[in-house]
Amino acid sequence: MRASVVRHHNESVALGTTPAGEGGPTVLRMILGGRMRRLREACGISLENAGEAIRGSHSKISRLELGRTGFRERDLVDLLDLYGIIDEDERAEFKQLAKQANTSGWWHRDTDWLPKWFDTYLGLEQAAQLIRCYEPRVVPELLQTPDYARALMVLAHPNEDEESIERRVALRMRRQEILTRPDPPQLWLIVEEAALRRGIGGSQVWLAQLDHVLRATDKSNITVQVLADHVGGPALADGAFTMLRFAESDLPDIVYLQQLTGALYLDKGADLAAYRAVANLLSVHAAPPEYTSQLIAALRERHPPTLDQPSDI
């Protein structure tokens, strides 16, 4: 992941008090990496010189500062020495944050099949305060029923056995628990009408899925807008995307773009502005949220499902 934009934070907040429970190690690594990067830059020390201090390369420092990998305590101590951090309490806070950042997320048990690039997304999704998504193909993952998700998995992974498929479904259902926790994120979805018409899994599964989306729209933290076919959403946005916003001031907004064999994580100001503009445009063209239940009910009654075979994780 490239992380080129980092908002300044309130340095009076204790480093060691950053909560590890929601986003797990991914977010904590990014927070720690961003703070270490600001320390290095404040001292005018290059990536190369910092790398030499920990017997590594500039690319290793870059990976640490971007949160791609965790800090070993020895490397952290050497860098704090190099950056002139001598206060023992402050050093202890950095060490505690590094220790928390090196723990495993709840999805660690699935790392035998989970792509590393998606492991990163899971941590970000768990920590997000706002999740804003445009989906032209299928019902978004955070609102899928188990049967609908299972049908997608079978289409996308025809050579996998039942146990492997069930592990994928279980992971997707576990992700959805963020929507019902005590302090859930705001979920704002813009879904193509065509995506809702696709009868993934057959009529029974499809109808149950639409009912599930209808129930979700009753929740105060979930907003669903439907984009009619004639609007031409795919012409406005080049595929699905997700925008994530975090409560932590250390973290920038991030745009997540999933690809067939990887993903992009964008946080440059120009990228964020472009995707934010497209998200706003899609929202304007989509039916207002208060009409979503009526549109889905009408779709449920009037349109027989059509089957498509999208690729999926």
Image (tube, rainbow, N blue to C red):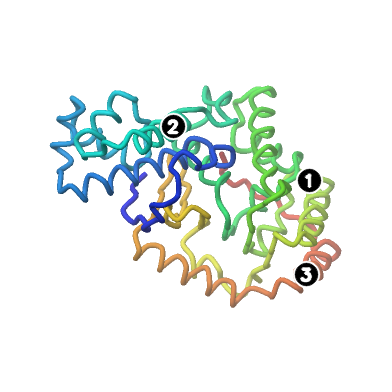
Q: Is residue 84 above or below residue 230?
A: above
Q: Specify which label sits upstream in the sequence, 3 or 2.
A: 2
Q: Is residue 46 left or right of residue 6?
A: left
Q: Is residue 194 above or below residue 2?
A: below
Query: The residue tagged with tag 2: helix, strand or loop?
Result: helix
Q: Residues within 10 Å of mark 1 (few under 14, many from 20)?
A: some
Q: In the rendering, which numbered label is found on residue 202?
A: 1
Q: Quadrant of residue 298?
A: bottom right
The foreground one among 39 and 196 is 39
* Mark 3 → mark 2, Cα distance in angstroms: 50 Å
> Which residue is tagged 2?
96
Residue name at image x 44 percent, y 32 percent: 96
The foreground one among 111 and 300 is 111
Q: Is residue 188 left or right of residue 8?
A: right
In the rendering, at what x and y percent does residue 238 appear?
46, 61
Task: Report the amino acid beneath label 2.
Answer: Gln
> Which residue is tagged 3?
295
In the rendering, at what x and y percent does residue 136 appear?
59, 59
Q: Is residue 280 above or below residue 33?
A: below
Q: Specify which label sits upstream in the sequence, 1 or 2.
A: 2
Q: In the rendering, which numbered label is found on residue 86?
A: none
Q: Residues within 10 Å of mark 2 (few under 14, many from 20)?
A: some
